[in-house]
Amino acid sequence: MQTVMALAAALAIGLPAIATAWAQGRIGPAAAAALSEKPELSTTAIILIAIPETMVILGFVVAVLILRGNG
Amino acid sequence: MMIRMTRVRIAGPRVLLDGTLRVLQDLEVVHVVRPAIPGPHGAPVDRESLRLRRILDDDETALRLLQASPSSGAPPGAVALPRAAALARRTRRSAERIARALAALEDERNVLLRYEEFFAAFDSLLGHELAWPDGRAFYVVLRAGAADAIHRLRSSLDAAVDGEIELLSRPLPSGETAVLILASAAVATKVGQLLSASRVQELPAPEGLGETSMLRAMPALRARLAEIPRAIATREAERLALRDAVGPELESLRAWLHDRLLVLEARAQAHTGFQLFVIEGWIPRPELDQLTTRVEHDLGPDVLVEAVATEPWTRVDAPVALANPPLFRPFEVITRTLPLPRYGTIDPTPFVAVFFPMFVGLMLGDVGIGVMVAALAVVLRLRSKPRSTLRSISAVAGACAAFTVVFGLLFGELFGDLGRRVLHMRPLGFDRQEAILPFLALTVALGVVHVVLGLTLAVVNAWRQGNRREALGRGVAALMVTLTVMALLAALRLLPPALFTPLVVAVLVAFPILVLLEGVIAVVELVSNFGQILSYARIMALGTASMMLAIVANRMVGAMGSVLVGVLFALLFHIVNFAIGLFSPTIHALRLHYVEFFGRFFSPGGTAYRPLSHWHPSEGS
């Protein structure tokens, strides 16, 4: 049972981490290109880059809850 | 906080228009706009403005070329314009002449240095007799990576002129290869033709040295190279002398010209008839008495000041001036990265000043890191100028450091668990390492407070703007979020369980009211509110990650075998943790404000309050 819980926790954080990396990998270059044209968009760029991190952060919270549930 | 604006109208005899504008410029409180009355206005671009701009162009170009310090702006003095214009034009020409001469000398030096590099490679040959005294030398530089071309060049030349040449090559520091070909007079022409045919470029002798043979030109070249720094120093001295002679006058002229152009721009906004003028503008309401008194004192009773109206918050074209207490003012650096809020809406700076450092402090939550952030804030403060962006950032960093130390004491953390192991620190609040779920609950509770506060500010905004229905809708949404959270707490027995049913009934009653007021889209917004509340869990996630990194760093001391290596690795990890701690919590605290909090109520699109004032050098040209 503990192995399954550990695997579940790993998946809970691992899959969102991949998704976040994929999203940031696409947003980052687009934001850099936009900033080279319009430096005043830096705030928007920061927000856009930080938005996908919600996935991995919530994944981390879920992983913690799974592991804590396991005692 | 946003200052309430009053619209004023100033009227008087036309002859007093310039005097009135000068008084307004000294006061620096009236944001001049075109009067809301029909009639002729001053020409937007008049002949005087064009002339002054030409003189200003001469003046600023001369100052730039003379490298006058931009901070040494002199106050505008009395200016005799024709003489000042001639001085600016004359100085500009002289400065341009000096700049051209300096650029030419630098170019010449760079070219000669390239030749010197070439001949340094063949330095041992200088002074020796050529194998063929009546022959000719060819100088070639081959590009980097083309060294094998030398062999091909040598064999093809040998074959063509039957050994009547001598070919020497040396590598240059740049990676290129210097090639010297010495040929007898009989074959010199043929060698030249072969080099041209094989598209090998000869290095021509520098112009102005009076020698076509580079070997003989070398002494002249070196003499010229020694002479150039002296020539540059002479020109620099000329530039400095010119700057000392006319710099202060040109600085003063620049300030006067900028001031005059600002007055002319304001005059173009004024309504001018044959006899009278009318100026309209906005001033902060508390400044009205000062304006009235000053105009009456300086211009007499002929010029009248009338307060047209104190603008209601619904007036969208009124300029926006923010005035926050000194404690909150540095946090304007966070709100000003977004466009200004619309007139009449809430300035979020005071709320940012409370929540931003609190969120960063909760994420970092370590006395050691807090002290390091405080040290960084002190360094930034010492290296920044008053009222600069860097000074504001240092104040924000200071507030974040204070919260980080306070939360560090509450969590009992000093570089992770180092404080507990060495100094026997105990958490004054709770231990983040053990109490992960209470920490999560705390951060989500903060999310509830922040989002509900945002919705409440949205109610105030909508009410001020006269949108009563929208205000009620946002109010009901805030109420529903609060009731739902309370119902959950009752279900979890954190509130009396008896409250659960009444709270659920209240939510069910509020729901159709919300849909009635704001439409079906309100349902989506309501659900997104809960999603955004959960987003505050990132505070716990980042805080836990930061703490775990610090603990791992401390455990390296005992895990590496050698204590010294362990300590070095631990230090490295703590430095990495500190670097991450500078960026990640800042970005996520910003995101929580910009997306989750501002998204509820922030309404951008305000016009900046720019009163008619004197020109300040820091504003740029």
Image: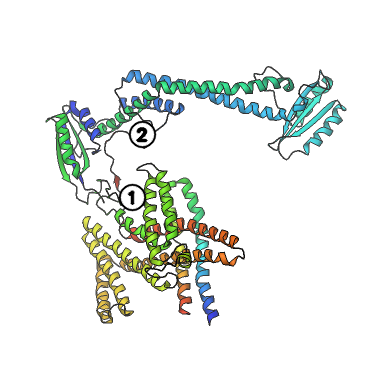
Q: Secondary structure at mark 1?
A: helix
Q: Is residue B590 above or below residue B528?
A: above
- Observer-nearest of B499 and B246: B246
Q: Chain of mark 2?
A: B
Residue that mark 1 sits on: B332
Q: Amino acid at mark 2?
A: Pro
Relative depth, front residue between A31 and B350: B350
Q: Residue at x 52, y 24 (%)?
A: B100
Question: Which element is circle 2 on?
Answer: helix
Q: Is residue A47 visible?
A: no
Q: Position of residue B178 (x, y in %)?
A: 74, 32
Above or below — where is B47 with respect to B602? above
Q: Position of residue B262 (x, y in %)?
A: 30, 32
Q: Which residue is mark 2?
A: B617
Distance Cα–Cα, label 1 vs label 2: 22 Å
Q: In the shown orientation, is residue B81 left or right of residue B568?
A: left
Three-letter amino acid code at disc 1? Glu
Question: Which residue sits furthest front?
Answer: B423
Q: Are marks 1 and 2 on the same chain?
A: yes
Spot occupied by residue B546 in the image (x, y as percentages of width and height): 47, 63
**Residue B293 percent coordinates (x, y):** 15, 36
Give the mark, 1 or 2, whose residue is nearer the N terminus. Answer: 1
